[in-house]
Amino acid sequence: MTPVDIPVETRMADARSGASSRATTSAASGKSVPAMELRAVKRSFSEGENELQILNDVNFAIHPGEMVALVAPSGTGKSTLLHIAGLLEHPDEGEVLIGGVNCADLGDDARTRIRRSDVGFVYQFHHLLPEFTALENVMVPQMINGLGRKDAAARAQQLLDYMRMGNRSSHRPSELSGGEQQRVAVARAVANAPRLLLLDEPTGNLDPTTANYVFDALQALVRASGVATLFATHNMELAGRMDRCITLSGGKVLPVEL
Ligand SMILES: Nc1ncnc2c1ncn2[C@@H]1O[C@H](COP(=O)(O)OP(=O)(O)OP(=O)(O)O)[C@@H](O)[C@H]1O
């Protein structure tokens, strides 16, 4: 059974019982396999004649079911880190492992396949398809991954229910508030039951009450599904509600005590 075929209820029951359709522990060591791991990752950009070393030997792993906050000043490399972790960009040096698979030597097609099935993204702006309803927006990635229309619609409705948007499934994005649009965007990002959910300031455009409401729904979904979540935010209150917090300083990932 492929991950996309698993009804959300089943995956949620699996997550609660510690079982999974995918390997989450190493057969050899019995240890939990990180959902995503960065090993000795470096990335620099040139600025005129200068070289900006944005990531400088980043080593970091995130495990299934963990919610990690990434809090760092603007321009320190949060988006760059998320893009590399989600296989949207290549590091200059180092390795990215998704579910124990080393993606460093994979070709573009294999990286795209892993990104589509194992990684979900949510951005500050929702990027929902304006001509489609909320339900259809959550169906699209599943159908691209080969799921039939009926099954995709059933799973989309379940995910919208989890995000407390079940009663708005027939609405188009323009008919929804910013917080509602972001809740649909989260449902879409987890539509293919990814191992890893990457969020780049998804509540940055929302007022604090709405941000908390979106976060509550997201947290319930993360807890139920066991997806590993890396959440870049400037909102310290939300960061304090996650399992741990990291920052970027001098190109390195460091833990932060909140
Ligand atoms: N493609 C690129 N070419 C050149 N410089 C880049 C590129 N992408 C990012 N940078 C630079 O790298 C640095 C880190 O950018 P990044 O977007 O990762 O920071 P950030 O921490 O996410 O910032 P913010 O909180 O403002 O979104 C910035 O100085 C940015 O200008």
Image: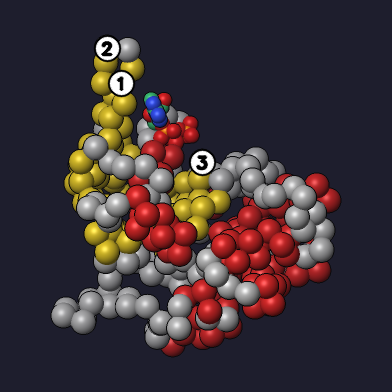
| Callout 3 amino acid | His
Q: Which residue is mark 3?
A: 234
- Is 159 rendered above or below residue 248? below
Question: Element type at marker 2?
Answer: loop
Q: Toward the viewer: 231 or 154?
A: 154
Q: Give left or right: position of 248 versus 201.
A: left
Horizontal and vertical percent for residue 110? 34, 58
How far apart are the alpha carbons under marks 2 and 3? Answer: 31 Å
* Residue under the image location 55 percent in, 51 percent down: 122
Q: Nearer the viewer, mark 3 or mark 1?
A: 1
Q: Quadrant of ligand 1?
A: top left
As drawn, the label of residue 46 is 1
As drawn, the label of residue 49 is 2
Q: Give left or right: position of 76 versus 147.
A: left
* Residue under the image location 67 percent in, 44 percent down: 206
Question: Element type at marker 1?
Answer: strand
* Residue under the image location 67 percent in, 50 percent down: 128
